Image (cartoon, helix red, strand yellow):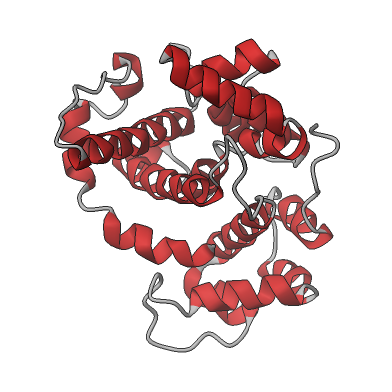
Amino acid sequence: MVDRMPAFPASVHRIIQLTADVNCQARDLVRVIDTDPVLTMRILRVANSAYFGLQMKIISVQHAVVYIGLNSVKHLALATAAIGSLPKESTEGFDADAFLKHSLAVAVITRRLSKRIGGVMKGDGDEFVGGLLHDIGKVLFTHFEADALAEAVKLSKEEGIPVYQAERRVLGVDHAEMGSMLAGHWGFPEPLCYAIREHHEAIDSEDAPPLRDCIFLASYISERRQAEAAAAEEGLSINYPPPPDFVLRRFELTIEELIEQLGDLEEELERVLMLA
Protein backbone atom coordinates (compact mmCIF):
# COMPACT_ATOMS: atom_id res chain seq x y z
CA MET A 1 0.00 0.00 0.00
CA VAL A 2 2.82 2.42 0.85
CA ASP A 3 4.55 1.76 -2.47
CA ARG A 4 1.30 2.23 -4.40
CA MET A 5 0.28 5.46 -2.67
CA PRO A 6 0.23 8.43 -5.09
CA ALA A 7 3.53 10.23 -4.72
CA PHE A 8 4.02 13.86 -3.91
CA PRO A 9 4.83 15.99 -6.96
CA ALA A 10 8.52 16.02 -7.88
CA SER A 11 8.74 19.65 -6.76
CA VAL A 12 7.60 18.73 -3.22
CA HIS A 13 10.12 15.88 -3.00
CA ARG A 14 12.81 18.33 -4.01
CA ILE A 15 11.64 20.79 -1.32
CA ILE A 16 11.92 18.03 1.31
CA GLN A 17 15.46 17.23 0.13
CA LEU A 18 16.54 20.87 0.10
CA THR A 19 15.14 21.82 3.50
CA ALA A 20 16.61 18.73 5.15
CA ASP A 21 19.95 20.54 4.70
CA VAL A 22 20.54 23.19 7.36
CA ASN A 23 22.50 25.14 4.75
CA CYS A 24 19.53 25.30 2.38
CA GLN A 25 19.43 28.63 0.54
CA ALA A 26 16.13 30.45 0.09
CA ARG A 27 16.88 31.06 -3.60
CA ASP A 28 17.13 27.30 -4.23
CA LEU A 29 13.73 26.71 -2.61
CA VAL A 30 12.16 29.58 -4.55
CA ARG A 31 13.56 28.22 -7.81
CA VAL A 32 11.93 24.82 -7.21
CA ILE A 33 8.53 26.24 -6.20
CA ASP A 34 8.50 28.61 -9.18
CA THR A 35 8.54 25.58 -11.52
CA ASP A 36 5.21 24.38 -10.06
CA PRO A 37 2.39 26.81 -10.95
CA VAL A 38 -0.24 25.08 -8.78
CA LEU A 39 2.01 25.07 -5.72
CA THR A 40 2.95 28.70 -6.32
CA MET A 41 -0.71 29.74 -6.56
CA ARG A 42 -1.66 27.96 -3.32
CA ILE A 43 1.26 29.40 -1.37
CA LEU A 44 0.53 32.95 -2.54
CA ARG A 45 -3.17 32.56 -1.77
CA VAL A 46 -2.49 31.48 1.80
CA ALA A 47 0.33 34.01 2.30
CA ASN A 48 -2.10 36.80 1.33
CA SER A 49 -4.86 35.53 3.59
CA ALA A 50 -5.94 36.75 7.00
CA TYR A 51 -4.11 33.78 8.48
CA PHE A 52 -0.79 35.67 8.27
CA GLY A 53 -2.34 39.14 8.56
CA LEU A 54 0.27 40.91 6.46
CA GLN A 55 -0.27 44.53 5.50
CA MET A 56 1.31 44.24 2.04
CA LYS A 57 0.33 42.03 -0.88
CA ILE A 58 2.64 39.06 -1.51
CA ILE A 59 3.19 38.84 -5.27
CA SER A 60 5.91 36.17 -5.54
CA VAL A 61 7.32 33.15 -3.74
CA GLN A 62 10.44 35.23 -2.99
CA HIS A 63 8.20 37.77 -1.25
CA ALA A 64 6.55 34.94 0.71
CA VAL A 65 9.93 33.66 1.92
CA VAL A 66 10.92 37.17 3.09
CA TYR A 67 7.67 38.00 4.89
CA ILE A 68 6.43 34.68 6.30
CA GLY A 69 9.73 32.81 6.47
CA LEU A 70 11.48 29.92 4.77
CA ASN A 71 10.04 27.27 7.07
CA SER A 72 6.49 28.56 6.69
CA VAL A 73 6.79 28.36 2.91
CA LYS A 74 8.24 24.86 3.16
CA HIS A 75 5.41 23.64 5.35
CA LEU A 76 2.72 25.30 3.28
CA ALA A 77 4.10 23.34 0.33
CA LEU A 78 4.05 20.06 2.28
CA ALA A 79 0.60 20.72 3.71
CA THR A 80 -0.79 21.57 0.28
CA ALA A 81 0.68 18.38 -1.18
CA ALA A 82 -0.65 16.25 1.68
CA ILE A 83 -4.17 17.65 1.37
CA GLY A 84 -4.00 17.05 -2.37
CA SER A 85 -3.52 13.32 -1.68
CA LEU A 86 -6.79 13.02 0.27
CA PRO A 87 -9.87 11.36 -1.26
CA LYS A 88 -12.38 14.01 -2.27
CA GLU A 89 -15.46 11.89 -1.64
CA SER A 90 -16.69 10.16 1.50
CA THR A 91 -17.06 6.38 1.48
CA GLU A 92 -18.48 3.91 3.96
CA GLY A 93 -16.19 4.13 6.98
CA PHE A 94 -14.49 7.35 5.84
CA ASP A 95 -15.98 10.85 6.11
CA ALA A 96 -13.69 13.00 3.95
CA ASP A 97 -14.92 16.32 5.35
CA ALA A 98 -14.67 15.22 8.99
CA PHE A 99 -11.22 13.73 8.32
CA LEU A 100 -9.90 16.99 6.89
CA LYS A 101 -11.35 19.12 9.70
CA HIS A 102 -9.93 16.81 12.38
CA SER A 103 -6.50 16.76 10.69
CA LEU A 104 -6.39 20.55 10.49
CA ALA A 105 -7.58 20.87 14.10
CA VAL A 106 -4.80 18.56 15.29
CA ALA A 107 -2.28 20.57 13.25
CA VAL A 108 -3.40 23.82 14.90
CA ILE A 109 -3.46 22.34 18.41
CA THR A 110 -0.08 20.66 17.93
CA ARG A 111 1.46 23.99 17.00
CA ARG A 112 -0.04 25.68 20.06
CA LEU A 113 1.15 22.89 22.33
CA SER A 114 4.66 23.09 20.90
CA LYS A 115 4.81 26.72 22.01
CA ARG A 116 4.00 25.60 25.56
CA ILE A 117 7.15 23.46 25.57
CA GLY A 118 9.27 26.41 24.50
CA GLY A 119 12.95 25.89 23.76
CA VAL A 120 12.67 22.10 23.61
CA MET A 121 11.01 22.29 20.19
CA LYS A 122 12.92 23.43 17.12
CA GLY A 123 9.94 25.44 15.95
CA ASP A 124 10.65 24.61 12.30
CA GLY A 125 7.07 23.81 11.40
CA ASP A 126 7.24 20.02 11.68
CA GLU A 127 4.65 20.29 14.45
CA PHE A 128 2.04 21.60 11.99
CA VAL A 129 2.80 19.02 9.30
CA GLY A 130 2.94 16.23 11.89
CA GLY A 131 -0.48 17.19 13.21
CA LEU A 132 -1.86 17.43 9.70
CA LEU A 133 -0.52 14.00 8.70
CA HIS A 134 -1.10 12.10 11.95
CA ASP A 135 -4.04 10.12 10.48
CA ILE A 136 -2.69 9.81 6.93
CA GLY A 137 -2.66 6.02 7.32
CA LYS A 138 -6.45 6.10 7.05
CA VAL A 139 -6.02 7.45 3.53
CA LEU A 140 -4.00 4.35 2.62
CA PHE A 141 -6.83 2.14 3.88
CA THR A 142 -9.38 4.23 1.99
CA HIS A 143 -7.44 3.93 -1.25
CA PHE A 144 -6.65 0.23 -1.05
CA GLU A 145 -8.70 -1.47 1.72
CA ALA A 146 -11.96 0.51 1.79
CA ASP A 147 -14.16 -2.52 2.58
CA ALA A 148 -11.89 -3.63 5.42
CA LEU A 149 -11.84 -0.09 6.84
CA ALA A 150 -15.65 0.03 6.78
CA GLU A 151 -15.70 -3.32 8.58
CA ALA A 152 -13.30 -1.97 11.22
CA VAL A 153 -15.46 1.14 11.77
CA LYS A 154 -18.53 -1.09 12.15
CA LEU A 155 -16.69 -3.34 14.62
CA SER A 156 -15.58 -0.28 16.59
CA LYS A 157 -19.19 0.88 16.98
CA GLU A 158 -20.57 -2.57 17.80
CA GLU A 159 -17.99 -3.37 20.49
CA GLY A 160 -17.31 0.14 21.76
CA ILE A 161 -13.59 -0.04 21.05
CA PRO A 162 -11.35 2.57 19.39
CA VAL A 163 -11.19 2.37 15.62
CA TYR A 164 -7.42 1.77 15.64
CA GLN A 165 -7.91 -1.35 17.76
CA ALA A 166 -10.62 -2.56 15.40
CA GLU A 167 -8.26 -1.93 12.46
CA ARG A 168 -5.69 -4.25 14.01
CA ARG A 169 -8.25 -7.01 14.34
CA VAL A 170 -9.54 -6.64 10.77
CA LEU A 171 -6.40 -5.57 8.89
CA GLY A 172 -3.60 -6.73 11.20
CA VAL A 173 -2.21 -3.18 11.43
CA ASP A 174 -3.61 0.20 12.42
CA HIS A 175 -3.59 3.55 10.62
CA ALA A 176 -0.95 5.01 12.96
CA GLU A 177 1.61 2.37 11.97
CA MET A 178 0.71 2.70 8.30
CA GLY A 179 0.91 6.50 8.48
CA SER A 180 4.36 6.30 10.04
CA MET A 181 5.55 3.98 7.27
CA LEU A 182 4.18 6.34 4.63
CA ALA A 183 5.80 9.38 6.25
CA GLY A 184 9.12 7.53 6.23
CA HIS A 185 8.59 6.59 2.58
CA TRP A 186 8.02 10.27 1.78
CA GLY A 187 11.29 11.20 3.49
CA PHE A 188 10.01 12.91 6.63
CA PRO A 189 12.32 13.02 9.69
CA GLU A 190 12.24 10.15 12.21
CA PRO A 191 10.83 12.20 15.15
CA LEU A 192 7.81 13.01 12.99
CA CYS A 193 7.39 9.37 11.89
CA TYR A 194 7.69 8.27 15.52
CA ALA A 195 5.06 10.80 16.63
CA ILE A 196 2.60 9.61 13.98
CA ARG A 197 3.18 5.99 14.98
CA GLU A 198 2.45 6.68 18.65
CA HIS A 199 -0.37 9.21 18.46
CA HIS A 200 -2.85 6.71 19.95
CA GLU A 201 -0.84 4.42 22.24
CA ALA A 202 2.27 6.24 23.36
CA ILE A 203 5.13 4.38 25.04
CA ASP A 204 6.39 5.86 28.33
CA SER A 205 9.92 6.83 27.36
CA GLU A 206 12.09 9.76 28.37
CA ASP A 207 13.69 9.52 24.92
CA ALA A 208 10.42 10.17 23.12
CA PRO A 209 10.65 13.36 21.00
CA PRO A 210 8.53 16.24 22.32
CA LEU A 211 6.71 16.25 18.99
CA ARG A 212 5.20 12.88 19.95
CA ASP A 213 3.65 14.30 23.12
CA CYS A 214 2.32 17.34 21.26
CA ILE A 215 0.64 15.27 18.54
CA PHE A 216 -0.66 12.70 21.02
CA LEU A 217 -2.30 15.41 23.15
CA ALA A 218 -3.53 17.37 20.13
CA SER A 219 -5.29 14.28 18.80
CA TYR A 220 -6.70 13.59 22.25
CA ILE A 221 -7.98 17.17 22.66
CA SER A 222 -9.54 17.25 19.19
CA GLU A 223 -11.34 13.94 19.73
CA ARG A 224 -12.45 15.01 23.20
CA ARG A 225 -13.87 18.28 21.86
CA GLN A 226 -15.82 16.36 19.21
CA ALA A 227 -17.17 13.85 21.75
CA GLU A 228 -18.21 16.56 24.20
CA ALA A 229 -19.88 18.61 21.45
CA ALA A 230 -21.82 15.56 20.25
CA ALA A 231 -22.93 14.76 23.80
CA ALA A 232 -23.98 18.37 24.40
CA GLU A 233 -26.19 18.31 21.31
CA GLU A 234 -28.09 15.40 22.88
CA GLY A 235 -28.27 17.12 26.27
CA LEU A 236 -25.76 14.71 27.78
CA SER A 237 -22.47 15.11 29.62
CA ILE A 238 -19.53 12.72 29.51
CA ASN A 239 -16.50 12.04 31.66
CA TYR A 240 -13.81 11.75 29.03
CA PRO A 241 -10.88 9.59 30.20
CA PRO A 242 -7.68 11.57 30.85
CA PRO A 243 -4.47 11.05 28.84
CA PRO A 244 -1.47 9.25 30.40
CA ASP A 245 0.38 11.28 33.02
CA PHE A 246 3.72 10.71 31.31
CA VAL A 247 2.51 12.54 28.18
CA LEU A 248 1.51 15.55 30.29
CA ARG A 249 4.85 15.52 32.10
CA ARG A 250 6.54 17.95 29.70
CA PHE A 251 3.82 20.55 30.19
CA GLU A 252 3.67 20.42 34.00
CA LEU A 253 -0.10 20.98 33.84
CA THR A 254 -3.22 18.89 34.20
CA ILE A 255 -5.15 18.26 31.01
CA GLU A 256 -7.89 20.63 32.16
CA GLU A 257 -5.36 23.41 32.79
CA LEU A 258 -3.70 22.76 29.45
CA ILE A 259 -6.99 22.89 27.51
CA GLU A 260 -7.92 26.12 29.29
CA GLN A 261 -4.58 27.73 28.43
CA LEU A 262 -4.93 26.81 24.76
CA GLY A 263 -7.79 29.30 24.59
CA ASP A 264 -10.39 29.60 21.85
CA LEU A 265 -9.42 27.53 18.82
CA GLU A 266 -12.36 28.30 16.55
CA GLU A 267 -11.00 31.45 14.89
CA GLU A 268 -7.68 29.85 13.98
CA LEU A 269 -9.44 26.69 12.77
CA GLU A 270 -11.61 28.77 10.47
CA ARG A 271 -8.54 30.49 9.06
CA VAL A 272 -6.56 27.32 8.50
CA LEU A 273 -9.44 25.71 6.58
CA MET A 274 -8.30 27.83 3.64
CA LEU A 275 -5.49 25.31 3.14
CA ALA A 276 -8.17 22.90 1.94
Q: Number of labelled discs? A: 0
- Image side of residue 189 versus residue 11, left or right: left
- Image side of residue 35 versus residue 155, left or right: right
Residue 38 quadrant: bottom right
At 62% from the left and 35% from the top, the residue drawn is 138
At 35% from the left and 39% from the top, the residue drawn is 222
In the picture, the quarter occupied by the N terminus is: top right
Give whichever of 99, 190 is nearer the camera: 99
Residue 16: x and y, percent?
A: 72, 52
Give whichever of 168, 232 is nearer the camera: 232
Give whichever of 155, 3 is nearer the camera: 155
Residue 153 quadrant: top right
In the picture, the quarter occupied by the C terminus is: bottom right
At 69% from the left and 70% from the top, the residue drawn is 39
Residue 4: x and y, percent?
A: 85, 38
Residue 257 quadrant: top left
Residue 263: x and y, percent?
A: 20, 49
256 lies above or below 12: above
Residue 8: x and y, percent?
A: 77, 53
At 45% from the left and 21% from the top, the residue drawn is 157
- Image side of residue 7 versus residue 249, left or right: right
147 lies above or below 78: above
- Image side of residue 94 versus residue 53, left or right: right
Asked whether residue 183 is in view, the answer is no
Asked whether residue 67 is in view, the answer is yes
